[in-house]
Amino acid sequence: MKTQEYIALEEQYGAHNYHPLDVVITRGEGVWVYDVDGRKYLDCLSAYSAVNQGHIHPKILAALVEQAGKITLTSRAFRNDQLPLFYKELSELTGYEMSLPMNSGAEAVETALKIARKWAYQVKKVPRHQAEIITCTGNFHGRTITTISFSTEPLYRDDFGPFTPGFVTVPYGDANAIAKAITPNTAAVFLEPIQGEGGVIIPPKGYLKKVAEICKKDNVLFIADEIQTGLGRTGKLFAAQHEDVRPDVTVIGKALAGGFYPVSAVLADKEVLGLFTPGEHGSTFGGNPLAAAIARAALKVIVEENLILRSAELGEYFIEQLSEIPSPHVKEVRGKGLLIGVELNEKAGGARRFCEALQNKSILAKETHERVIRFAPPLVIDKETIDWALPLIRDVLNME
Ligand SMILES: *Cc1c(COP(=O)(O)O)cnc(C)c1O
């Protein structure tokens, strides 16, 4: 079957909740993906940073195949021999005493919000069902009813209310706004250290540090959503570490399983995560042995292949080179590590057409927020490949 035939089937039988580029991928390897017509592309999206380790990393694949032949799902009604090792290795890598595994990122976000509310009632003694959680404009935390309840993007919300109460939204990047929004009932401040879907928005220097100080002073939990920014993407294990901040709770997902499987987790110390008691929260698939084995291998690859340092060094190079491209369309190039956004001028006619032009030049990137092209290749990319891509990107950024 050819590209157009696959697309026709998808359009006929699938809900149209995405607007993908018209490329039908059939296999991938490292930073490269191949379409059904045999064309090869550089993946500059990495499945929204879920494939930081590169497509079909052989070590993660081996772990998947081995575990799939043993036991895949026990449910948490019984114990399995992978989950304890996953817990231990995740704790040793991240420095948090405990974790709670879920599947999608949105589920881990919901889990973090639930534990923050429980902490507010049990520890902070907020009157029951009065807890407030502060969120930021431009956020993206998933697509569940609760996570869209505090979205500020009309498209994500307009037809989907009524919404979950208990959330207050303040401007992103403004620490004073957070300080002002805190009340005796505030359980947590919940934000992304860098907003990925929001358009690779980097907050002002010192923001995270200030937020952490405010939270500490006012006895409020600081929860970071590092689902996209975590696990090396920005050149640190966690983006909050760029400001030496250690939030009380960190939420991870995406690259936690290297693109093989949906695995997410909430990380925190015992005084917070230890508050859950049996039966209060759960997931049939969360913490299953296949997920745990895959995630263990995916974390090991990040460490063994020095992907964090690689992201820092190559990201700096990529950003610098992109910044030097003369273009009538570019307003700003920004990023941390290999999470890079090229913001276009208002007159450029939207990022979509630039992404389509990049596709024609064998580079797959995706627009985020109409005017930003995101470049976030797998962290296993090398300098030669970036040098191959740069002239192609330059051509596209100079089209009519
Ligand atoms: C992708 C993402 C999510 C949602 O993860 P899903 O696995 O799609 O549910 C939440 N927060 C951030 C910051 C994300 O980038």
Image: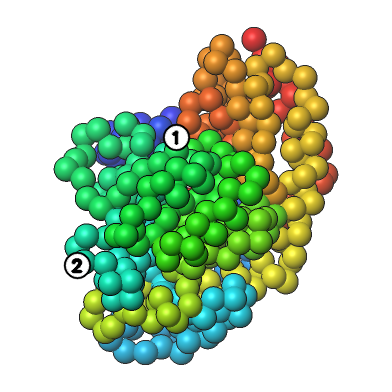
Element class at badge 1: loop
In this rendering, would 193 be left or right of 145?
Answer: right
Taking depth in this image into account, of 5 and 399 the one nearest to the observer is 399
Q: Is residue 221 visible?
A: yes
Q: Circle 2 is placed at which residue position? A: 128
Residue 388 vertical position relative to residue 121 in the rendered view, above or below: above
Element class at badge 2: loop
In this rendering, would 25 be left or right of 30?
Answer: left
Q: Circle 1 is placed at which residue position? A: 20
Q: Quarter of the image for the C terminus: give it.
A: top right
Q: Residue at x 38, y 82 (%)?
A: 274
Q: Position of residue 129 (x, y in %)?
A: 19, 63
Residue 285 vertical position relative to residue 359 in the rendered view, above or below: below
Determine whether the beta carbon of the residue marked 2 sits less than 8 angstroms from the nearest atom of ligand 1.
no
In this rendering, would 154 be left or right of 81?
Answer: left
Disc on res. 62: none
Q: Residue at x 56, y 79 (%)?
A: 91
